[in-house]
Image: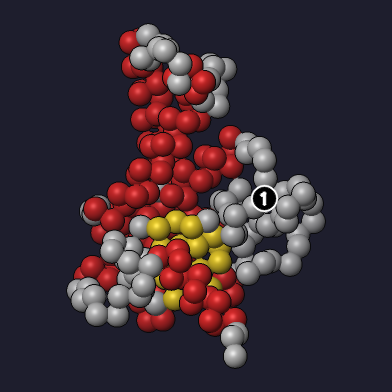
Amino acid sequence: AVDLEDFNYALDKVIGGLEKKNKIISPEEKQIIAYHEAGHAICGWFLEYAHPLVKVTIVPRGLAALGYAQYLPKEQYITRKEKLLDDLCMTLGGRAAESVVFDKISTGAQSDLDHVTRLSYDMIMNYGMNEKVGNVSFMSLAGESYNRPYSEQTAYLIDQEVKIMIDEQYERAKALLRDKRKELDSLARTLLEKEVLLRSDLENLIGKRPFADPTPGESASMPEVEPTSRDDED
């Protein structure tokens, strides 16, 4: 018979690849991975516009994934700037946790940095979400005959504003994790013991998420609903 556990196994396999039970990870590396994934989870838990967490794991899978946090994407057609900024902050939560806890950083954030860099440039160059660059979008122009549809001065400004945006969200993530250090330590320790934690486990460890998770078609300001049980891969 096929049950829920089989579906969960199949989902993990699709998202992260085959489980690498023979992959030898040192205790020091495993601790770094646990805090990295706990950093993502804690930031997502305490950021109002983050996707609802489904699962966080430090089970190594595939060729590169040493752990990942899985989120339930919301069905939406437009996204506000506040939501995108929370996404940036949550994605930087892994590296921020490493910095806060160990005062060092590792190569484990490469895919996170790729995501935040692409999203930041999109916000500024294509969605007009920066006051200094303005309400402009270069997405369609870039596909035309122009090599670059803006000046050197604008290119420099875009680069500067991307750096500022990422730096602000990184510092925001570190500040949040310092404030929630007790919860971060608790989650990381439990991850090291169990390797896989579900949303219900987080609720037992650090309490219910302080924000409602709206279902498709609902506003975030509506009364709290029963919590439901994206994929971020490191």
> In the rendered image, which residue does mark 1 sit on?
75
What is the x, y in percent for residue 90? 47, 50
- Of residue 39 and residue 143, the one placed in the foreground of this image is 143
Residue depicted at 28% across the width and 64% down the height: 63
Kind of element beneath mark 1: loop
Residue 23 visible to the viewer: yes
The three-letter amino acid code for the residue at tag 1 is Glu
Residue depicted at 45% across the width and 63% down the height: 15
- Of residue 175 and residue 69, the one placed in the foreground of this image is 69
What is the x, y in percent for residue 30? 27, 71
What is the x, y in percent for residue 38? 42, 64
- Of residue 70 and residue 97, the one placed in the foreground of this image is 70
Dot 1 alpha-carbon crowd within 10 angstroms: few under 14, some 14 to 19, many 20 or more: few
Q: Count the labels in the image.
A: 1
Q: Is residue 36 left or right of residue 140?
A: left
Quarter of the image with the N terminus is bottom right
Q: Is residue 148 left or right of residue 55?
A: left
According to the image, what is the colour scheme of the structure?
A: secondary structure
Quarter of the image with the C terminus is bottom left
Residue 33 visible to the viewer: no
Residue depicted at 62% across the width and 62% down the height: 209
What is the x, y in percent for residue 7? 55, 77
Furthest residue to the right?
223
